[in-house]
């Protein structure tokens, strides 16, 4: 399968995504979600990272009741993780490249680490790839695309309780909104002022763009209401975000 990558430019934003091969689930247990998010933080530096060492260090710091950040970055970051959302069979990231080659190296380390963990945990020896080829990426070119993309990513988990909601809307929009406020596997909660995985993402740009946590929450709620009012067969969010 050909690699679907733009030319990554340092300082620019990119929507990076992938799914399980044959749309299979890539997060089977709560611990898998935690592991992927832990990798997002710990692997964001150029040097060789041994995840077992980082996990052991984290556990040691917890045993010692360390009250600061239990994950301490040791090297220069390759990317800024602006936003993320994990779904049972796929993930979405918005990354800003900080150094030349940063996104490619970061995603290679992320994939290798998580696939190694997953294959060992679930005894997948000789079963082929976990992901559907290499990751895909789309350059975020303007404010409109970025706004729509954030709303799309943060509302993505709604499909776990209403599969076709993007095509026909959601009958009970309040239920969808409340569900998002309980969904842990994205940084939406951090963005609306509810600490969840605060160390993983850099939210200053996002906050400035939307005008604060309240505006982010309002925009996501309005997005769900907007989709709920659309009739089947109208413009899809997928077209808007250029996937």
Image (cartoon, rainbow, N blue to C red):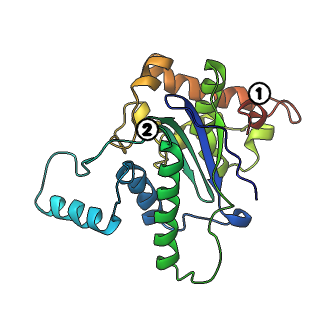
**Residue lying at 74% horizontally and 66% vertically, measured from the top left:** 22
Secondary element at tag 2: helix
Mark 2 to mark 1 CA distance (whole Å): 25 Å
The numbered disc on residue 229 is 1
Give left or right: position of 209 versus 197: right
Between circles 2 and 1, the one closer to the viewer is 2
Residue lying furthest left: 64
Residue lying furthest front: 100
- When asked about the image quadrant of residue 193, the answer is top left
Give left or right: position of 103 versus 80: right
- When asked about the image quadrant of residue 5, the answer is top right
- When asked about the image quadrant of residue 7, the answer is top right
Q: Nearer the viewer, residue 1 or 180?
A: 1
Residue 49 coordinates in the image, percent (x, y): 34, 60
The residue that label 2 is drawn on is 189
In this view, 24 is above or below 145: below
**Residue lying at 31% horizontally and 69% vertically, measured from the top left:** 52
Residue 236 coordinates in the image, percent (x, y): 79, 34
Q: Is residue 161 something that shows in the picture?
A: no
Point out the tag, 2 or 1, that comes first from the N-terminus. 2
Q: Nearer the viewer, residue 158 or 242?
A: 242
Quarter holding the N terminus is: bottom right
Give left or right: position of 131 versus 98: right
**Residue lying at 39% horizontally and 33% vertically, measured from the top left:** 202
Q: Nearer the viewer, residue 87 or 161?
A: 87
Secondary element at tag 1: helix
Count numbered badges in the picture.
Answer: 2
In this view, 200 is above or below 24: above
Residue 172 coordinates in the image, percent (x, y): 67, 38
The numbered disc on residue 133 is none
């Amino acid at each position: 399968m050909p690699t679907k990558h733009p030319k990554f430019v340092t300082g620019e934003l990119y929507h990076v995504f992938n799914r399980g091969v044959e749309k299979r689930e890539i997060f089977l247990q709560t611990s898998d979600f935690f592991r992927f998010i832990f990798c997002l933080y710990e692997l964001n530096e150029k040097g060789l990272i041994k995840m077992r060492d980082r996990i052991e260090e984290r556990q040691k710091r917890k045993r010692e009741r360390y009250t600061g950040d239990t994950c301490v970055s040791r090297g220069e970051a390759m990317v800024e993780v602006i936003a993320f959302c994990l779904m049972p069979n796929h993930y979405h990231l918005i990354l800003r490249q900080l150094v030349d080659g940063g996104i490619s190296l970061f995603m290679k380390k992320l994939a290798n680490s998580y696939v190694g963990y997953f294959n060992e945990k679930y005894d997948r020896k000789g079963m082929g790839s976990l992901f559907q080829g290499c990751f895909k990426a789309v350059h975020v070119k303007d404010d409109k695309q970025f706004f729509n993309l954030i709303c799309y990513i943060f509302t993505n988990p709604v499909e776990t309780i209403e599969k076709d909601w993007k095509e026909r809307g959601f009958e009970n929009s309040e239920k969808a909104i409340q569900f998002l406020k309980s969904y842990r596997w994205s940084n939406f909660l951090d963005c609306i002022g509810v600490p969840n995985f605060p160390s993983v993402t850099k939210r200053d740009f996002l906050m400035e763009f939307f005008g604060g946590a309240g505006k982010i929450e309002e925009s996501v709620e309005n997005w769900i209401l907007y989709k709920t009012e659309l009739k089947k067969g109208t413009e899809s969010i997928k077209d808007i975000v250029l996937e």
